[in-house]
Amino acid sequence: MLPALSHIDTWIFDLDNTLYPASAGIFPLIDVRMGAYIADLLKLDPTEARRIQKKFFHEHGTTLSGLMAKHEVDPYHFLEYVHDIDMRSIAPNPRLAGLLARLPGRKLVFTNGDAPYARRILAALGLAESFEAIFDIHDQDYLPKPAPLSYETMCAEMQVTPSHAIFFEDMARNLKPAKALGMTTVWINNGSEAGHLDAHPDFIDYEIPEPTDWLAQLLESNT
């Protein structure tokens, strides 16, 4: 283990495009269903529905947050609909499962999605037993990353000491609040949508294309 990370006792991972590659194409499937949901809800054509969808995403952190704020959408209904997708593009990753098992300390998932969806993703990856807990959008009281309060709530609820935690995330902007709390940060720079926005070395400690090889090197390192 790298001496610089010897103090870490909690390993926190985002879910989408972090524990699996963006190339799996899962989020585009969700994206399409979000657009369809908005088009049906607001009686819009697909082009206008997509514009609203992306506007809410950029202004509120998630499309769901915008829909809740502006249209009082039921989050459970929305999430059940948009996450009803085919996950056959996700391949099991037994190597990552083995590496996670070797990491010293706790392993958590911190996601703007919901726990039922996260469990389906983890099962598809073969990681169903790899994490102690999932802290989801319901746990965040619908205040999504990168809202600083969502990180504070997660740390308080999950009893995480930020200075002893490391956070892996594909969206660079979501690392800034984690760094501000004292976490070590890892940016999974793999081409996910909006992943590069607001990226800055001030709040990114490590930049990697995917976690599996990096964790293997980390566990094998004695220097």
Image (cartoon, rainbow, N blue to C red):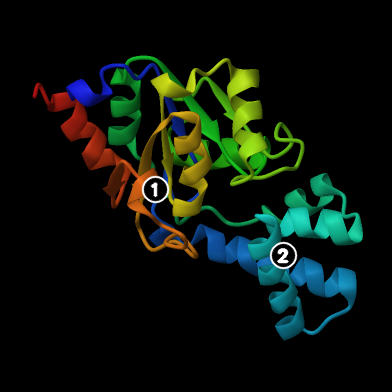
Which of 118 and 171 lies nearest the eye of the viewer?
Answer: 171
Which of 60 and 82 lies nearest the eye of the viewer?
Answer: 60
User: At 76% from the left edge and 36% from the top edge, which residue is drawn?
Assistant: 141
User: At 70% from the left edge and 78% from the top edge, which residue is drawn?
Assistant: 51
Graded by Cα atoms within 10 Å as few (under 14), some (14 to 19) or many (20 or more), the crowding at tag 1 reads few
Question: Residue 78, located in which quarter of the rendered image?
Answer: bottom right
| Residue type pointed to by label 1 | Ala
Question: Residue 46, located in which quarter of the rendered image?
Answer: bottom right
| Residue type pointed to by label 2 | Phe
Please state the horizontal and vertical placement of residue 91, each as a whole percent of the image: 39, 48
Please state the horizontal and vertical placement of residue 99, each as a whole percent of the image: 28, 27
Residue 15 visible in the displayed image? no
First of labels 2, 1 by sequence position? 2
Q: Quadrant of the C terminus?
A: top left
In the rendered structure, the answer to whether residue 205 lies left or right of residue 115 reads left
Q: Quadrant of the N terminus?
A: top left
Please state the horizontal and vertical placement of residue 48, each as a whole percent of the image: 75, 82
Whether residues under marks 2 and 1 lie with C-beta atoms below 8 angstroms apart, the answer is: no
- Give the Cα distance between marks 2 and 1: 31 Å
Which residue is labeled 2 in the image? 56
User: At 28% from the left edge and 48% from the top edge, which residue is drawn?
Assistant: 208
SS of the residue at dot 2? helix
In the rendered structure, the answer to whether residue 103 lies left or right of residue 33 reads left
Graded by Cα atoms within 10 Å as few (under 14), some (14 to 19) or many (20 or more), the crowding at tag 2 reads some
User: At 69% from the left edge and 76% from the top edge, which residue is drawn?
Assistant: 50
Would you place residue 171 above or below residue 222 in this image?
below
State how many labels appear: 2
Would you place residue 160 above or below residue 15 in this image?
above
Which residue is labeled 1 in the image? 91
Please state the horizontal and vertical placement of residue 30, each as a whole percent of the image: 62, 61
SS of the residue at dot 1? loop
| Most distant residue in the left direction | 223
